Amino acid sequence: MKTVLIIQARMQSSRLPGKVLLPLGSKPMLEWVIARASRSKVIDNCIVATTTDSSDDPIEAWGREHGFNVFRGSQYDVLDRYYQASREANAETIIRVTADCPLIDPDLIDELYYFYQKEEADFAANRLPPPWHRTYPIGLDAEIVSMKMLETAWKTAEEKFEREHVMPWFYDTEGRCKVAILDNPVDYGMHRWTVDTPEDYHMMQALFGKLKDPLTDSWMDILHIIEKNPELEMINADSHAKNVKVIDSRS
């Protein structure tokens, strides 16, 4: 099956505008997401899905300049953006990640993919957002669904948060779909390695300065660095993830 990884990206983040193209070491954050995710063995194509709003022209310009696949779609109906990007790519399986996760782990993506197949699930993820609990650090998040099921959600989802956050339709109503959650044997859900606030960005800058190789370091390598340098996570200790039902007020 053709497996397409779609990276959700926009410049108008409510808490840290322009974050996806902010520099981390030698590359913009979005490029680290692409470079690390593209090392997955199961994906056939990688697409950056941004919006048609003029504020996201820099993402398209940067992507085209560097030879990356860029799709532009709805600003707030992100479910539609994913569906249209998947159709254009002739995807059969879609993996969703977001552009604020520069430490996304390709081996974990592969593990989730094989778990999804083994479980014969409609939807699989390595976490669900608050209020649900998680066992992997925030910033390693990936979700998988078939094109058939994504189309069902696209046709059926009515709530604003289901359209904006792409995947909640699959899990917000118990029994609607077969949901499989990949949990880590040890709970590391308290760690936050995403960039959604200025404090998150400062923490990530400091962390990148301690990585041996930002491209190939595994999430366990990163965990060992964090455990040796606990002061890093004090930088963004007050940053928190949004509840899944919170939508962008600008929509």
Image (cartoon, helix red, strand yellow):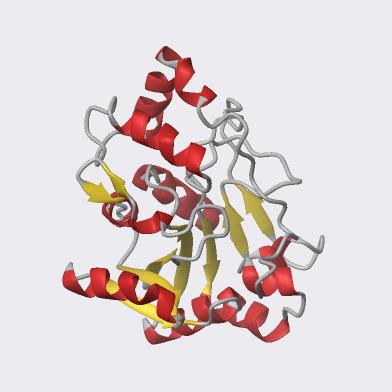
Please indicate, yes or no, whether residue 91 appears anywhere in the rendered image.
no
Q: Is residue 171 above or below residue 192?
A: below
Q: Residue furthest right?
A: 174
Left or right position of 214 against 18: left
Which quadrant: the C terminus? bottom right
Which quadrant: the N terminus? bottom left
Q: Is residue 179 above or below residue 93?
A: above
Q: Is residue 215 above or below residue 113?
A: above
Left or right position of 96 against 37: right
95 or 213: nearer the viewer: 213
224 or 114: nearer the viewer: 224
Left or right position of 131 against 206: right
* Residue 124 rendering spot, x and y as whole percentages: 59, 56
* Residue 45 rendering spot, x and y as whole percentages: 30, 69
Residue occupying image coordinates x 36% and y 29%: 207
Which of the 4 image quadrants contains residue 232? top left
240 or 5: nearer the viewer: 240
Residue occupying image coordinates x 40% and y 36%: 204
Q: Is residue 141 above or below residue 224?
A: below
Residue occupying image coordinates x 54% and y 32%: 236
